[in-house]
Image: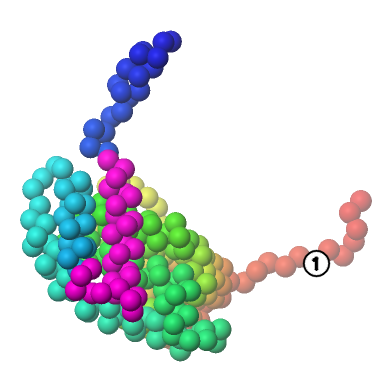
Amino acid sequence: MDKEKIIAELNRHKKLPHLDFRLKQETEDFTDTLFYTLFDANTPVAVNLELLENKFNGLMDMACWELERPSHQVWNNYVSELPGILEKLNLDAEAILNCDPASLSIREIYMAYPGFYAIAIYRLAHELYVQDVPLIPRLMTEYAHRQTGVDINPGAKIGKSFFIDHATGVVIGETAIIHDNVKIYQGVTLGALYVAKNLEKTKRHPTIMSNVTIYANATILGGKTVIGENSIIGGNAWVTASVPPNSTVFHTPEIKIKTAPNV
């Protein structure tokens, strides 16, 4: 096959004419700029808000090719929510500092904890998600996922003072609801019992009430599953039904002791 035929075949199989990967790259740049604007002492807030608005307008132009979007109004709504988001993130950082004996300072939390970074980008993306901004919120949380190993869908609803310890391998689904003062550890999954496209508009992921601790590699599944407040879910537990308040759930390992050598 000659070069011209190869080019023609490649162009014929490119099925999405609006698939512009600049959107992904520029969303990541927008996310970095937004994070620094909120937390870095040397980044001027007033200057960066104008810069961020310009970046956001460009993202909306690329993301909203199917329909008209009043990006100016969306941005104004978003900016008005940023002080409240920052207040929540400061509470998240304080929760980590207060709960993790390995944390040495609040600066360490903001700069070195992957769990905090994942929560921060989730909260910043969630506000765009609730305004029905297409694709951009998911690209933001996937950017954090790639950097931290924490996969939080921007549609999840998460309350105050949330703490993810060690972070890697955590998965929180789109319709999960997490109330206040919840702690989870690495490898925790808040997922669906099964996946089918016709469940798109239904609650598929669990609800975690306040003051719950979920230890490493626990899996909690199902939209009707509710973990009652003040409960503890032990490591490696598999939970597919609701748990009443003040409960403790443990995985019981099966231990077999070899009494004779193999023949």
| Left or right: where 21 falls relative to 48 | right
| Left or right: where 94 falls relative to 177 | right
Write the start and end of the magenta stretch as one range: 20-48
**Which quadrant is the N terminus positioned in?**
top left
Residue 113: percent from the left, percent from the top?
47, 74
- Residue at image position (31%, 62%) is 31
- Residue 95, picture quadrant: bottom left
Q: Does dot 1 land on a helix, a strand or a loop?
A: loop
Categorize mark 1 by other alpha carbons within 10 Å: few (<14), some (14-19), many (20+): few
Name the foreground residue: 152 vs 69: 69
From where the camera sits, is residue 205 visible?
no
Name the foreground residue: 226 vs 149: 149
Eyeballing the image, is 215 above or below 140? below
Name, please, the residue furthest toward the top: 1
The colour scheme applied to this rendered structure is rainbow
Residue on which disc 1 sits? 257
From where the camera sits, is residue 141 visible?
yes
| Main SS category, magenta section | helix
